Image: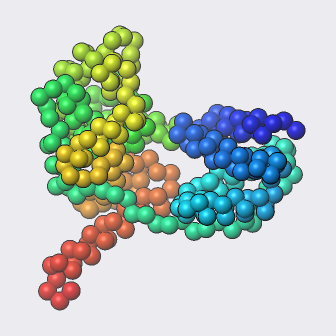
Amino acid sequence: MESSEYYIDLFLKYMRSERGATVNTLKAYDKDLRQFLAFLREDNLEIYSATRDNVRDFIMTLTENKYNKNSVIRKLSTLRRFYTFMVKRGFIGENPLVSLFSPKQEKILPNFLTQSEMERLIENIPLDNPLGIRDRAIVECLYSTGMRIGELVQLNVSDVRDDREILIKGKGNKERIVFLGEYALKSLKRYLKEVRPNLVRDDKEKALFLSRFGTRLTCRSIERMMEKYGIMTGKDVSPHTIRHSFATHLLENGADLRAVQELLGHSDLSTTQKYTHITLERLKEIYKKTHPRA
């Protein structure tokens, strides 16, 4: 047999080239598999010789170390994918996770801002300096389109179309079209006209949103920026909060669930349905506050 690392690398290459896994997904797979391998090697075992009992012991160790249920489920999902790949390629004869019980995932309602909080967040981003103009355009684009932060940082100038459309390459390299509202379009045009030309250092740079060094912005840079403006607004805000707010506000205002699914780029409608729980909870709150006999 080859080394355990060899099979992990082979699996990651397969997931990237044949299944279109994103960089972040591949990093998570790699981290989960190497954590399991480190656990196995405490008993001088390798990843290709793991048994069902080894996997069970691993789950128990994670639970004892206070990993939350959803993290454990995600790691189990990684192992299932990996060992399914190993069996299909003929590297091992049996999948040690076959018929192994998986705990039920906890339902965590997404964090979101109300429509007035979203307005306040945007209005608190100053427009008296170039980076503020850029940041306002970023937040407006996130809120107008509901795109993921990873999708936003990968945008090139050429992805923005003249007719208020943006071409996005999402999870699994699936392309979809999202739309820019009036406010987002106005902010983006101002950024492209007044700010980006002064940030760009290399004429060959294609990235839509640039750092002050003229390079493509990273996810972490935008996360830090969002944290800063969230503090100014008195809210805990991340790029994903904006995505959740986008979906919630559409549904609150009568959007069709399947339309929201398409805009978010969800392959499974059940992923989108979690936002209906939010709107139902808010309806309950409104009912309790306003009905005379509630």
**x and y, in percent, of residue 274 in the image:** 41, 63
Q: Is residue 241 visible?
A: yes
Q: Nearer the viewer, residue 68 or 209?
A: 68
Q: Nearer the viewer, residue 68 or 23?
A: 68
Q: Which colour assignment does the render follow?
A: rainbow
Q: In the rendered view, does 146 fall on the left or right side of 125?
A: right
**x and y, in percent, of residue 125 in the image:** 17, 38
Residue at position x 62%, y 59% in the image:
62
Q: Quadrant of residue 201?
A: top left
Q: Quadrant of the C terminus?
A: bottom left
Q: In the rendered view, does 104 fall on the left or right side of 147?
A: right
**x and y, in percent, of residue 261 in the image:** 41, 53
Q: Residue furthest bottom?
A: 293
Q: In the rendered view, does 162 fall on the left or right side of 129?
A: right
Q: Is residue 247 visible?
A: no
Q: Is residue 61 above or below residue 29?
A: below
**x and y, in percent, of residue 225 in the image:** 29, 37
